[in-house]
Amino acid sequence: MPTSTHFGPRLAEILGIVGHKIILHRFPDGELRATVGPAATTTIVCCSLYQPNEKLIALLLAAEALRRNGAKRLVLVSPYLGYMRQDAAFHPGEAISQRAIGTLLANNFDRVVTLDAHLHRAPSLTGIFPGIEADNLSAAPAIEALLRGEAVAATTVVVGPDAESRPWVAGIAGRLGLPYSVAQKVRQSDQSVQVSFPDPALFPGRPALFIDDIVSSGGTLTACAEALAALGASSIEAIIVHALFPPALMTAFGRAGIRSVRSTNSVPHPTNAVSLHYLLARALRREVVGIPETRSTP
């Protein structure tokens, strides 16, 4: 997909397969025409679903063309999978986007592979994509590899934004031998969040490393940074899996006391510093006959 050129060509190279661009043409009325390359019996389509609306239409068109050209198995690789937040109708008349998009993709693909999908009440992707294979990989190994290479100070406190992040943050901290803390968060709106920490004595004079799956509005990250600074953290850094926020927010993050923000390359962003290619390549090995082993560090 044209918007995934930051990811697809390198993934094809690691897998040892030929990659082809999906070419999109826009008609004057806004409709799209999709033109695909040659189809294999198993065809992998790479499309990161940030800003997803137009991409979903392009995926449907591409899937139709690939099936007609001979693809028997279509695998969607979506490093970031949009529309997973809304998993229930909280007010009368609301659509459940997770259910609608899950059914749409399941009707057109045989397998979906993503990383750290934004799931709240759903225990896995299985029920979201009925009748097909679905893999929700974790970016944790790639993040841990980055941090091990930097020899993170043993006094660093790994910080999660809310109770939902506890298993993820606790796992990373435990494998790195670091303490961790999880914020208590009350969201008042997309931009307004109140944050406190149950163990304030843990932070004075120690570096804080904030880790989260998604940052979009930046409200939670900013509130956590301000709380950590007030508690005396000696420095604050952040690592984000899916960086959906506008780069202009980096100025506000700096004012809140954040020294650096890094992200994975699930979404193209100036903060990209953690490659997910090898994690995805390992998950896709069985789709490709004769794929070479990949021994590089994630």
Image (cartoon, grey):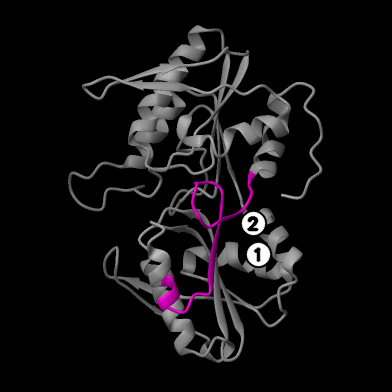
Residue 103 picture quarter: top left
Residue that label 1 marks: 171
Residue 266 sits inside the magenta stretch: yes
* Residue in the foreground of this view, choosing between 74 and 234: 234
15 and 163: which is toward the camera: 15
Q: Is residue 83 visible?
A: yes
Residue 197 in sight from this viewpoint: no
Residue identified by numbered label 2: 140
Residue furthest top in the image: 69
Q: Position of residue 67 (x, y in %)?
A: 50, 12
Instruction: Give the residue drawn at x 72%, y 38%.
Output: 282
Three-letter amino acid code at the position of disc 1: Gly
Residue at coordinates 47% horizontally, 79% vertically from top-left? 257
Q: Mark 2 Cα within 10 Å, few/some/many (few <14, many 20+)? A: many
Amino acid at pointer 2: Ala
- Looking at the image, residue 144 sits to the left or right of residue 86; the answer is right
In the image, the segment drawn in magenta is 253-276
Q: SS for tag 2?
A: helix
Give 219 or 286, whichever is nearer the viewer.
Answer: 219
User: Residue 122: horizontal and vertical position, in percent?
Assistant: 46, 48
For this orientation, the residue located farthest to the left is: 92
On the picture, is 82 further left or further right than 159?
A: left
First along the sequence among labels 1 and 2: 2
Residue 61, x across and y down, in percent: 40, 19
Q: Residue at x 73, y 69 (%)?
A: 176
Query: What's the CA distance linking mark 1 and mark 2?
Result: 8 Å
Dots 1, 2 in contact, CB < 8 A:
yes
